[in-house]
Amino acid sequence: MEEKEKTAYHEGGHCLRAWRANFLATLDTCLKQDGAGYWWGSTPVRRHRFTHVERAQIALAGLLAEAKAVASEGGAILNLASSDDLAGLIAQLFVDEAIPVAGPGFELEEDNVWERAVPLAGGGEQVANLTLADLVEVPADQRGQPEIKSALDALVVFINDPAHWAAIDSIAKGLLHLGGGCLGHFMIYSIIKTATGGLLDADE
């Protein structure tokens, strides 16, 4: 799978998890290419509309959605699994890299990318990207291994849900083929409604 496609599914994961938590707080989702040809994505949200637990899940959803997409590229949709090892590796990044916490007025001067192996149900794993832009969105009180493991466990269930995966897949394809690589709020709403046959209510 090409980087552009991986990035589209990565942003699709962020977008749907945010949308399901508070659809009014999901602004848009976009793909962009820099001068060096590197693809990156952006899914800005109104942070104050989410709990810290929701923000952590939104931040980590891109990694898992990208992994599921690449693993499923052959045709059969493969499910994700969670693990203590992955949670520990992510938690260690916050220790080793001194990652700042995003807040009002925060701007990331330069991004960074780490590859992490995401476990698959039934065995095996799929490498996907975790970015500095993802990690800065994890609140300070959600950066320990237990909190990250809890977020990953919840995301595995969320992304493996067939309706949710259909929505992520449709958002990714929309990013690749519609709107010049940017989907606004109404387009996201329309894509999710069409993909899921009316999955419109936010999570409880």
Image (cartoon, grey):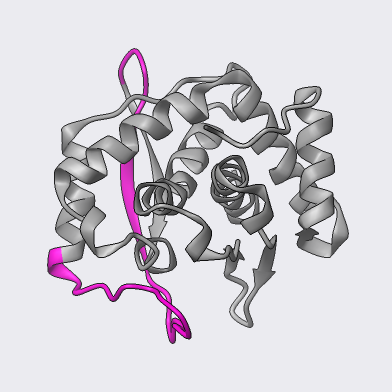
Q: Which x, y percent locates residue 89?
A: 18, 49
The image position of residue 138, as x and y in percent, is: 34, 59
How many marks on residues? 0
Q: Nearer the viewer, residue 200 or 15?
A: 200
Q: Quadrant of residue 112?
A: bottom left
At 60% from the left and 61% from the top, the residue drawn is 43
> Looking at the picture, how far across and down is residue 164, in whole percent?
61, 28
First to last magenta residue range = 95-123
- Say whether residue 122 is magenta: yes
Answer above or below: position of 71 versus 127: above
Q: Is residue 166 left or right of residue 21?
A: right
* Residue 13 position in % (x across, y down): 55, 44
Residue appearing at x 59%, y 66% in the figure: 44
Q: Is residue 15 left or right of residue 139?
A: right
Q: Residue furthest top?
A: 122
Q: Which one is nearer the viewer's eye here, 53 or 165? A: 53
Q: Nearer the viewer, residue 48 or 120?
A: 48
Given residues 84 and 113, the one toward you in this image is 84
Considering only vertical position in the picture, is 109 above or below 193? Answer: below
- In the rendered image, the quadrant that contains the N terminus is top right
Main SS class of the magenta portion in the image? loop
Residue occupying the point 64% across, 51% down = 8
In the rendered view, tell whether residue 78 sits above or below residue 29: above
